[in-house]
Amino acid sequence: MTVVVSPSADAASFKRARRTGNARRRCHHGDDVVWRWAIFSPALLLMLALSVLPLANLVFTSFYDVTWAQGQAIWTPRGFANYAALPGDALLRAGLVNTLIFAAGAVAGQMLMGFVLALLCSRVTRGQVFYRTLFILPILIPGIVVGAIWKLMFNYDFGLLNQAIGLLGFAAQNWLGTQQTALASVILVDIWHWTPFCFLLFLAGIESLPQDIYEAAEIDGASLWQELRYVTLPLMLPTIMVTFAFRLMVAFKVFDEVYLLTGGGPGTATEVLSFTIYQRFFTENRLGYGAAMSVMVIFLVSILLVTGLSVRRRAAVVA
Amino acid sequence: MKPATSGRVTRRGVVVGGGALAATAFGAGGHRARAAVAEPISVVINQSPWFDSFRQTVELYEKQTGNKVDLDVNPFAGSLEKQRNSVRAAKGQYDLLVMNSGWFAELYFGGFVEAITDIDPSFKLDPDVYTLGDTIWFDPVKKVMTPAGKLMSIPISPLIPLLYYRGDLYKGAGLSVAETFAELEANAGKLNHPPGVYGIVQRGARGTASVSFDFYPYLYGFGGGIFKDQAAGDYTVTLNSETGRTALDYYLRLAKQAGHPKTASLDQADVIQNMVTGKAAHIMMVIAAWSQMDDPNKSAVVDKVEFAPPPHAPGLPTAPGLGHWLGGVSRNVPDGRKRAAVEFLRWFQGKDAQLANVKAGGIPINAAVYRDPIAEEHRYRWMKPLAAALPHAINIYQFPQASEVTAILDLGLNRAVAGEITVADALNSMSEQIYGVMGKYDYKTGKLPPLR
């Protein structure tokens, strides 16, 4: 943000006045405050229009039931009834539990694989461009294509996965159709899809680490494990934490993979929050209740966001 | 049709498609269409297996009348959202709404569809047009679908499920067509040789009216139902009756004894795939899939699949659930375009247009076509069974909150098929939830004692 100072006030006197409170009085009585708000207000209004207003509208809607008659919308006040109904929604409960499992499993897998791949790739001297391209390929594929690829891979009758395990003498599995494997299968797809994101951030982090510390460790006779444990990991911690926060937030909002692969089934085995909202809000056309559900999810994601930002700040301080 | 960009159909194949259709239509019927010159209209429609036949029929309309039709083609869910957005606006984008059985009630009750006879009082419904559970009419005061109400729409595709069965396997095993559930069970059992051929492949996955749509012919064919009497406004939930239990028991037994081992995860595409790859002896499938059976590029069982009305319990009629599409005129478009949409519907409902429709691969909405010599041709061997079943088709939902009930059914039935819960638990829990939904919207409702 640019602060515009009146030409009549020199910098030194302005600082002094600010310290003593004179500036505040001057700003309130002078023209500069008008000017300041004049240039600030368009940005503020734009921000309000684009972010706060839709959110406020969502919150407003969550206190109503919306129906239609004679071509007109009828808004019936519900107070907190839509929110009160949330804990009793079995689909929402299943979605919340599955989302937590999904986020934990997928992010842990992506972080681990991404870090290992980044480490390996950073040590490769020949063909690094090839490996980088290969590893980031899944992230370039549109979600709908990812769904198609894995729907075919998991197919019970002719899927590549069942054919592969068949060659090893194992019976065909119904990957997406049983309670035991459906969520794990979706997590596997998400790991495959988003590991490149972690890989890219980790690789950038590893390549920016100061080499003199590694040279010192080598002189001190550190093994590869010790180097990883006592040099790489501590130095990479800020990057790891930021990547973790970003991925956790995105994993919490998963929708496309579930929609395309399982539709939330079998039963509620792969029901996730975003899919539940989609069902309630769009399919069932329950705008008020769907809005209340959305507000709750925004609240949960905000907690993740705040946690992520605070972790990032802490990581920056450590760095 | 207007040339269009992504998601829209360009005018193409007029010479090949429309020309050929025109020739066949004139040759078969010899009648000229009588549509008046009208403004261009915009139609929002879904990308269904029958869409291409509709497109070709529309091209014929354009060729015959000179009127222009713009088709906005979308996936199923996308079509619904576009219709909602359009009708809720001050000025609608689409003149003709192609509405599915799952959401037309929402648009009727919401006052978004204008009665055809209000737009053009001289409009006469062709007496041979199927009225599909009276869903083309609506009484906005009494909120019921009845011929005493106003004419709100014309059927676009009269979809119901039929029993598809492998005629060659039947012949080889010396079986006769299954008319009752007992016969179906026996035939499926005899033809069940997994993993090469499954006796029957059912659509047990959870989705938007997936397993529930597959289950309706069984539920209603056994004499059961979800509600006591919708037409009379009695929404007492009867799903968990003894009849309901018999139907679900049968459905699960069929899956277990003669079905695909992964029924709980099979959706519509999977079921069709099993049939066209020769792995299913029977499927209960919406009739729109018939053309895929005989398409040598898609099917390994060309000319081997036969059709029959869905089986039923002895003494009861066949009872397929409606999965049809209706064309209604949007309330919030200019009068000229409303009249143009009505002109199109007037033309579309006639025998000539429907004859062209069926030759293009569509399902005719006019009974006269089913009496035409074309129904005797082997290629159209599904027409007689369809004509026999259509008068018995059941409109499952007559209220706008149907999607909430469908979601409950799809989840509960899927859990039962997957073996997560027992039949009694599934029926009891679904009934309790449906009772809650109906009560929430102030319908006259009630419930049966839980099954034990």
Image: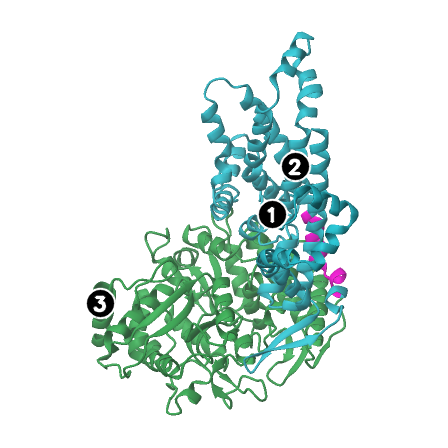
Question: In the rendered image, which residue does mark 2 sit on?
Answer: A242
Where residue A125 appears, as percent x and y from the top left, is: 49, 17
Looking at the image, which residue is at 64% across and 58% down?
Answer: A31
Q: Residue B200 at what x, y percent from top left? A: 51, 56
Above or below, A291 relative to A168: below
For the point 57% across and 50% down, the residue is B262
Question: Is there one chain holding both mark 2 and mark 3?
Answer: no
Q: Which segment is the magenta one?
A: A85-99
What's the amino acid at mark 1? Thr
Residue at the spot of label 3: B20
Spatial distance from mark 3 to mark 1, Cα to Cα?
70 Å
Chain A in the picture: what colour? Answer: cyan
Above or below for A107 versus B209: above
Q: Position of residue A281 (x, y in %)?
A: 61, 64
Chain displayed in green? B
Using the image, name the chain to which the residue with label 2 belongs.
A
> What is the spatial separation of the Cα atoms under label 2 and label 3, in whole angstroms?
63 Å
- Residue, disc 1: A2
What is the distance, in whole Å, between disc 1 and disc 2 at their CAs? 29 Å
Q: Nearer the viewer, residue B20 or B76?
A: B76
Residue type at mark 2 is Val
Which residue is rendered at x = 57% and y = 28% of the image? Answer: A203
Tell me: B179 left or right of A27.
Answer: left
Kindly state the secondary structure of the residue where label 1 is placed: loop
Disc 1 + disc 2, Cβ < 8 Å: no
Frontmost residue, B2 versus B161: B2
Residue B238 has which mark? none
